[in-house]
Each structure stands twice: as C-alpha cells, then as structure tokens.
Image: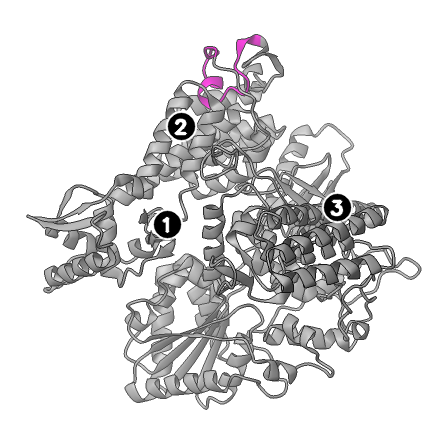
Amino acid sequence: MRFSLLGPLEVVRDGRPVPLGGLNQRAVLGCLLLHPGTVVSTGDLIRALWHDPVPPTARKMVQNAVAGVRRALPADGSCTLETTSPGYLLRVDPDLIDVTRFHALVERGRADFRAEQWEPAARRLREALALWRGPAMADVVESVTGWPELTALEEARLAALEDCLEAELALGRHHELIGEMTSLVDEEPARERLCGLLMLALYRGGRQREALAVYQGLRDVLRDGFGLDPGPELRRLERDILTQHPRLAVAPRTAPGMVDGGFPEGAVLSRVAGSGGAADRPATAPPARTPCGKTADAHGRVSGGGTGERPVSERKRASVLLVRTRMDVVHDASECVDETLNDLAHVIAEEARRFGGVVRETLGSVRPVVFGFPQSHEDDPERAVRTARAIRARIADRVAAFLGVQIAVATGDVLATYRDEHDPAPAHLAGTVPHSAERLLARTPHGGIQICPATARAAGLHAAPPEGDPAGGVAVSPGHGPVPGTPLPARPGRLVGRDRDLEILRGLLGDVRRRQRPHLVTVLGEPGIGKSRLMAEFAAEIPGSVLVGRTPPYAGGILAPLADAVRSRPDGAEAARLIERLPAEAGAAAWRRHVADLALEGPLTIVLEDLHRADAALLDQVEDLTEQLARVPVLIVATARPELRQRRAGWGCGKRDVTTLTLDPLSDEEARALLPLPADATMLKLVGGNPRHAEEYARAVRGHAGDAFDGAYYGAPVPGPLRALVAARIDTLPLPERAVLRDATTFPESGFRAEGVAALSARTTEETAAALRALERKDFLVRRPSDRSGAPEYAIRQPLLREVAHAQLPRSRRIDRHRRAIGWVQTLPPDEADLLIHHYRLLVILNSPDLAFDTVRQAHHALLAAERRAAAAGAHDTAARCRRAAHDLRRGRSHSAPSWAAALHRPLPHRMEESPVATYH
C-alpha cells in the first residue's frame, strides 16, 4: 500500500486506487498520515475538520470517519488504526508515505549541496520535487480549517526548490531555468532568494536589463507591502550586476571544478554575492539540463530515481510571432532609448502572457513569441494575431515616437526537443516556421503586421495573399481581426443522440420549479462532444429567462463568465460592469444578490460555459452556489471538459443539490446521420462518435477543409481544425504521460501491454503501468481483457487521438520505436510472433526509398523465421499469418486505402511496389 499526500490524497494498493469515501474520512486519514506512529487526539481531529462553531455531532462524525478509514485499510496487519486514549494511532511504515520520502530525499540533496556537489544535489532535489502532484492534500484542504502542517510542507517545498535551482545554476544551466524561475517569481514575488536566483540567471543569459527589472520589482513589493528594502545580499548582487563583476560570470573550465580566478564553475548566489571563492569541490560533469531524478537499476534501466535523463522530441503545430524593433534616433538619447526598450519588453511580455504565449530568447533586435509550446491550444494562431494587434495598439499609445516595430506571424509544424521529460519548456525549437516568419518580417512595413496564409485561415481572417505571390503574407489592418465567439451556437438541424440528456436537464429544471431552490448541473464531455450544442437546444425550449456566460480562453477577469451571464440580459450591462470592478468575493456576492432578485420574477436558468478554463477563485464560488444562493428557483448549468476533474477531483462532492452529467459519444448510426454518404467504417472509427469530428470530416468531403491534412499511418487524413483540437487535449497531460501515450501508438489498434510500451523507452514496467493507469483514468485509454499472457491490455480510446498522437513523433523516432518493439516481440512466446507483422509493415512504409529494398528483405526473412518458431510450438494460426504477411511484403502488397480518401482529394497510400516513402514529411 502507498499513501500520497503531496497532491490530492490518494491511497494505492496493488496498483489500484483505494476508495476513501467522503470528505470527513479523507481529512481524518490525511491528518493521521501527517503524524504516523503518533497518537492524535479526538479534539485535534475535530479542530482540524471544523471551524467554530463545531457541530454538536462532531465527535460521532469523527468516529464514523475512523470506522470508514479502518474499512479501507488492508486486513493483513501491515497498516493498522488503533483507538488509544485520548484519540487514535495509525501504525504504518513511514516509507510508504510520500511526505517521508520527500523529506529524506531533501536531506540527502542538502547534504550534497553543503558539500558543493552540485550535480547529485540537483538530481536528488528534483527527485524530491517530482513527488508533488499539486498542493498538498488539494482535495481536502479547501474544505477544512488551515492546517499548520500543510503550511510547513509548502514552505519546505519552496526551500527545496530554491536549493535545487541554486545547484542547477552552479552547473551553468541558467538558460534552461529562466522560464521556470520567472513563473515562480510571479507566484512568490516577495521571496528574496528566489528573486536573486532569477537575477543571476538573467544576467548570465545576457539579459542584464531584465535582471535589474526583477530587483526593482522586488523592491517595490517589499516597500509597498511591508515598508522594507531588499536585504544586503540582494543589494550587493544588484551592484555587481551594474558593475558587471567578474564573479557573476560562468567562466570556462581550467581545472576540474575550478575556473580562472579561483571561483567554482557556476558559482551561485550565496557565493557570488560574497567576497570570496568557495573551497575546492569534487569534479562534476554537468549534463546539459536538470536531471529528472531517476535511478538506474542493476541492468542499467532507468527507474524511479537515478542519473539518467529522458530526452523527448515532439512535432506539433505552433505559431511564431516575431517583433523587430526599429530606432530613429538622431542625437544622443541613450537613457531614453533604454527606457523605451524596457517599456517595449514589458509590453511584449505582458501581452504574450495574457494570450498564453511564451517569450523566447531575444535575437538581436527581434523578439520571438511562441504559441503552442509547452502547451498547445486549438486557437493558437488566433492568439498570436490578437497578441500582435495588442502589441501594436499599445506601442502606438505608450511607447516613444522614435521607436517603430514590424510584426510577423507564421504557423506550421515545429519540432521541439526537451532535454528531459520533466523540463517545463523545450530547450530547442526547429522547423521552417521561424524561417517563414523571418521572410514575412522582411516584407512587413514599419508599423505593420504580416501573417502567413495558414495563420489567416486558422484565425478566421479570410484574405488572400498578394497576386502572383501565393506564399506571401496577409496584411492585418487595425480593424481586421477574428470575430469573438458567441456563447451558444446557432441550432443547425436536428440535435442527434441527446434525447436522454435533454430529458435529464428538463427533469432537473422541473425539480427547481417545484422545490423553489437552486440546483447546479455540471455537463462534462471531451472537446467537440456537443456540450454547447446541447445547451443551445435546451435554452431554446425554456420559456423563462436564460442567462448565458462563457469563460474566455484568455485575457478575461476572474468573474468574467458571471458578468457575461448578467450582460446577456438587455438591461444587464451596468450590473455586469459593477461585478467586474469588485474583488472576487465581493463581486460573487453581488452577482448572487442580483441573480436572487431576478429569480423572484420567475424560474431562472444560467448557463456557464467552458468552466475548465476558470480561475480557482471562480471555481470556489460556482461550486458553492447551491449553498450560498438564497432559496430561489435557479438552475445553474456549467459545461466543462474533463480537465475540470483533473483540477478538482472532488468537484461537487458532498454539496447539496449538485448533479454531474457526462456526455457519451454517439453511436455509429447516430454519427452516420451527421456524415455525407458514403460514410464507411474507417471514417466512422476516426469520428469516434464525436459530433465536432463528424462536422469537420463532412466539411472536408464537401471541399471546405481549409488547413492541411495530416496522417500518421496509411494516409488517414486529419483536418487541420481537428488536429489542433485533439493536440490541445493531449497537451493537458504532463509530458511523461504524453511520452507514454505516443509510445503506445507504436502498437496496433488491437491493444498493447505495459511491458511492451516500457520496452520502447528507459522506463520500468511498473512505471509504465502507472502511467497507463493514469491515462485510463483520464479517458485516453480503455482497458481490454488479455487473451494471451493474462496481463492487462489497453487500447487508445479514439482512433483520431491515436493518429494525432502518433503524428507528433518525429519520423526517426517512429522508426526507432518500431525497431525496439520488434526486439521486444522476439522475446515473447512463439504464439505471439504475429505481433511482428504490424511493426515490419510500418517500417517498410517509414523508411526512405534508399533503404526500402533492404527493409523489405529483412522483414521477409524475420517473418519466415517467426513462422518456423510458431509452427514448431504448435501455433499454426500464428505461423500462417506470419507466412502470409512475409509473402505479401515481398510481392509489394499493402492494405487498401479508405474509400473516402479520394473524396478528400488526398493521394492514396503508397503501395509497396512503388518506392515506399514516409507517410508524413
């Protein structure tokens, strides 16, 4: 059994989560786990669970929760909960609790840190930090009183993170750490040590001006909030940056562990701010990036905690925005120029952050902003265009007249390389998109914006490039921009396959009218499943008032959907402005009063769309609406993607009058009604019962596909909007889980096992199995019973998800994965030898024409050898399949293409007798 507190409370037994019951039971268990082997009094448990006044039945409720915890614990005596005066004692091996492991790893890392052994210190501290899955006991702490133990845990995490960053700075990794530290300083702007580390990383990265701006920001926070100045160490660091003191630089090696002048390589904040060098330390050979904190077992396989890094490469759609600065200075105005450039940098960073972009390293006078990394969104091109227009508008209003800018945006495929799967952002971006943006920038007039045709199509700017130059850009005028989306779509045609869901909503609305009290319904579903369409149908048949609010994908206030719902009434503009101006708590209270007044006139329905995008403060308010609203007839319907469950595992648990409705995919017959004829089985599989998928394929067949297609296997086309939609969903996963998902796409649709997926990478089978279970919980995989080895088998839930995820692997990685899979299959019993067929077929397709003949010959010999092994073991069906596949490959036969590929104006898949080429270039 394993207990996890560093994130949502979780207990795992034999690889499966243990049900923990309600909030009280989880809180009692969490409190006992924070004090293992120590008696916790009943009074302490009561104080931990309730504010004053304490309910009169609190002691009985604690006893019931303890009884529930006992039922959840194993009966083998390995973990027991005893009643001991004056409370309860949990006897458990501390090593089974992640908090204990965290403290042990931090202590070991700090010992290495004190010895100035930077590489093992960074590795162990990263391993400790990797145990955190979110705020400690995130699903419990929001509903109970403040626990000092959790405050101490959070402080321990921040202190360990600062030690880790300092150790990695000592290894010269300042370029890779800047993005992570900038986000941390935004969250903790008053932590002096963290700000000092960021100042040092920026200085070493050639960004002296930004380093000084961090110091200025810290000084403002301390003075305004506390009436204090930064400490002497920070003031000394500021002076050293201003004078460019040599001790701040990372000098080349001259001896193991030492640099010219006697300073240790990568000397860190506590040392560079002082006056002298540190003592000699053991030589280290720092890797290029922060280790992920994994260990190698006796066979050299990387597992839960060691020295190996796990590089990751992924190919995704991204938009690159370039801003070039032009100066018209005729006399000495260096101070004015420096202030203006600072203003410009602030404007670009602020607008990029507002629309979800990431500012990369400045290249001369060009500042790049990337949209789509590290997390992509289905509207990244639109975000880039809006950012460009916002930057231009703000520069025209605020920045000095002698400064001019040119802005260009290009969209296309980008190959990102992470030095380790735990890196927060890619170390390198490659592809033709940056070059396309540079070419557009060269053609852009001063003060203008040029975007590529792909960006224009994706952002809804239907403008053609100049005549005679189909690769040219589209100019964006100040009034030329995407039209904001409406909260609910129009009602085109008949709603298919949602009669039962409509009946549920109608019944809940009837309950609200009859009982005269509020009810919250959360409608969950994957992107494109039809949540908004269902809401449009439901709202159209309601005779009373319907308020509709939409959570904006970017650049919205905390209470934006609540204000938007009020604004949807003809007379609601003034009330909406008041709600937006107030702080979150006061604004939500004003909104509730306004809604209660409206409901006095008659039953009221409120639709809040896309709640998964909402700020945590808004989620708190919405989740408590049925508790906080007056007793009035109000039905609140919130739509959200499954990410809401990932953010709030206990969403709605224990609340009064709360219902969750999950939209399932349509059946094949229902999906066929949305597709043009003929809709064969292959197209239906790709659609996967998702109405949005069906709509995009229908548009593609009618010749309105817009963006380019992409396919990973046998030429199965994926329309551009769907690729963006599915890629954005994949990017909600942590990078290690994304890597496991992509590895899983190497195997055939029939299924795969953890052992096989682990063989494609440096993960252990246990580690891979845990990732596959997490993907199953998040609805990316479906479990199937095994028919051979008895081990659990999984399959990717949607073929379209499989296509997009596999296409994100670079072709060289796909070839490597198939070769590794072949090596693993050859270790299996002979009756499973037919698993080789899938991998050899794809190797033939993926390899270049120069290697095609050799690949076919190798596949032919390997499959005939597999046939002989299977026949000798009595697996005659397997032997027949291997022999048939070997001869098909030798004669150049391949699977036929989908019958609808021609309808999409796509070339049919390359046959084997032709020169086999990569499916995707």
In this view of the protein, which residue sits in the foreground, 436 or 211?
A: 436
Residue 266 among those drawn in magenta: yes
| Residue assigned mark 1 | 7
Residue 245 among those drawn in magenta: no
Q: CA distance from mark 2 to mark 1?
A: 22 Å
Magenta span covers which residues? 261-280
Which of the two discs, 2 and 1, labels the residue nearer the N terminus?
A: 1
Q: CA distance from mark 2 to mark 3?
A: 38 Å
Q: Residue furthest top?
A: 261
Which of the two discs, 2 and 3, labels the residue nearer the N terminus?
A: 2
Which amino acid, mark 3? Gly
**Magenta highlight: main SS:** loop
Which amino acid, mark 1? Gly
Label 1: state its secondary structure: loop
- Residue 112 at x, y percent in the picture: 41, 22
Characterize the local packing of mark 2: few (<14), some (14-19) or many (20 or more) Cα atoms within 10 angstroms. Answer: many
Q: Residue at x 61, y 51 (%)?
A: 825
| Residue assigned mark 3 | 431
Characterize the local packing of mark 1: few (<14), some (14-19) or many (20 or more) Cα atoms within 10 angstroms. Answer: some
Q: Residue at x 90, y 57 (%)?
A: 469
Q: Residue at x 30, y 85 (%)?
A: 516
Which amino acid, mark 2? Gly
- Residue 903 at x, y percent in the picture: 80, 75
Q: Residue at x 46, y 85 (%)?
A: 500
**Is 703 displayed left or right of 235 in the figure?**
right
Q: Is residue 629 above or below residue 503?
A: above
Q: Which mark is residue 109?
A: 2
Characterize the local packing of mark 3: few (<14), some (14-19) or many (20 or more) Cα atoms within 10 angstroms. Answer: few
